[in-house]
Amino acid sequence: MDFKKIISHAKEYGFIFQSSEIYDGLSAVYDYGPNGVELKNNIKEYWWRSMVQRHDNIVGIDTAIFMHPQIWKASGHVDAFNDPLIDNKDSKKRYRADVLIEEYMDKLEAKVHKEVAKARKRFGEAFDQDVFVSTNERVVRYLTEKERIAKRLANAMRNGDLADMKTMIEELEIADPESGSRNWTDVRQFNLMFSTQLGNIAGEEGKLYLRPETAQGIFVNFLNVSKTSRQKLPFGIAQVGKAFRNEIVARQFIFRMREFEQMEMQYFIKPGTELEWYQYWKEMRLNWHKAVFPSEMLRYHDHDNLAHYANAAVDIQFQFPFGFKELEGIHSRTDFDLGSHQELSGRKMQYFDPEANESYVPYVVETSIGLDRMFLASMSFSLQEEMVPDAEGKESSRIVMKLNPCLAPIKCAVLPLVKNKPELTEKAKQLFDDIKFTTQVQYDEKDAIGRRYRRQDAIGTPYCITIDFDTLSDDTVTIRDRDSLAQERIPIHSVRDVLSSRIDFEGLLRQVG
Ligand code: GAP
């Protein structure tokens, strides 16, 4: 679905609101509404249960956002957590130089897609995409150009060559997307950490940072957790929590925010085994996504540019409405973090390996996913507009969120057929009161039944239970399936069991592998 429609649907149905809206909003900061918070909690639960509950060697933790400032020195964030910034002198707008160049590459890719679509239409059944892409002169030119730019950008990023990034922007004649001006400043480094001040200490001494990743809270607690949980290597520590980044360009709704949430897991392993575990987590995490999204909307993307702490890194990209973009990162972080904390704190960040009879600083494989990005992926994949037959059998369009039932904000709606019949509403309320202890359920009696179904479709409710006049005589209800629209009659006393067998968290977790 069109991205703008997704954004307005998110607001209209109480999923996401702009932060501080009555004061005209705060850029790249968002609030989650009543349906949004349920969906977000369900995503967290899916992640937490598949990490912590399913693995007896992964434990959870919840660390503070404020941490000793030396932590960010040791982690490299004070010196290296920068993005290349460029200003347009005419519009006074700020951009990330690398993103301007990447957007130029996206345009080349879009041109390729256009050529492919045209050719497919022209050749019909006989069309062979691979042959076309490797032989069509125009397509080959676009792809070669894209590859050349990607390599040069990766080089410039790796070497911190800001001057070359500026030259690329000039050579490619990249203009300010808003004003069209090509009057650019030089490119300079911009640190993404937000800072604040500790109450009683003035100046640099009291400078604190809002954490830009949750991972460091895990690293600095490695000794505490390994001692108290009596885990042996390999073992993992998982955490869900807020992170903050002063993003230069924060567009695309909740894709890039200044305050966001991460779900991270650090897997501590014996040095030398990291590539094996890296491969394991790469596959495991893709399976987790495949259990709720179609495979063709997911792909791996190896990093051209390794972060300062990694010796291997891959993104799991998702096909957002604006193209394939990073949803999750899997990084082999070596012993960089524990080693740096050991050096700066003077505390031994080591593990005694009883089998090898030696102590060492463990290596780490990390999985890191943005909760808000997973939310956006879930919304953008599931929100669909389709034609379905209405009560009279006529085709009409409906907006439906085809979320996995385990993730849906409301699992079931209880609906008396009409509002002004107390015998129906009382029976419906009894059922509602009975099942609300086991599942997230909503009671709704306002408007015609068809409109109520549509309202539930629009927020992704997988099942609607209707209490009608037959219910009064035979104690059965209809259960309507959101996706197939099939309606079945079931005994009222079996509703709880039917719902729990169809909203199957256990089945979902087993699917992950
Ligand atoms: N600890 C490693 C780390 O933080 P990252 O690739 O910078 O790695 C991990 O971030 C994930 O966090 C990303 O894959 C993305 O899903 C999410 N993320 C990063 N920056 C974000 C932002 N500004 N807004 C929303 N999500 C973000």
Image: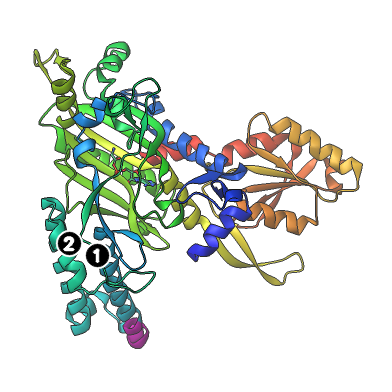
Mark 2 burial class by Cα count in 10 Å: few <14, some 14-19, many 20+: many
Q: Which residue is mark 1?
A: 101
Does the magenta segment cover residue 284? no
* 490 lies above or below 335: below
Q: Which of marks 1 and 2 precedes in the sequence?
A: 1
Residue 130 at x, y percent in the picture: 23, 74
Which residues, given as a range, are shown in magenta?
A: 118-125
Q: Which residue is mark 2?
A: 165
Task: State the residue lying farthest toward the bottom.
Answer: 122
Colouring scheme applied when the structure was drawn? rainbow
State the residue in front, 286 or 470: 286
Q: Which residue is at 17% across, 62% downward?
A: 165
Q: Quadrant of ligand 1?
A: top left
The reply to whether dot 2 and dot 1 touch (C-beta < 8 Å) is yes
Q: CA distance from mark 2 to mark 1?
A: 8 Å
* 290 lies above or below 175: above
Q: Amino acid at mark 1?
A: Ile
Task: State the residue lying farthest toward the front.
Answer: 202
State the residue in front, 204 or 36: 204
Q: Is mark 2 within 8 Å of ligand 1?
A: no
Q: Amino acid at mark 2?
A: Met
- Secondary structure beneath label 1: helix
- Residue 403 horizontal side relative to residue 251, left or right: right
Residue 373 at x, y percent in the picture: 41, 48
- Residue 181 horizontal side relative to residue 337, left or right: right
Q: Tell us which disc is closer to us: 2 or 1.
A: 2
Residue 324 at x, y percent in the picture: 34, 60
Kindly tell me whether residue 29 is visible in this rendering: yes
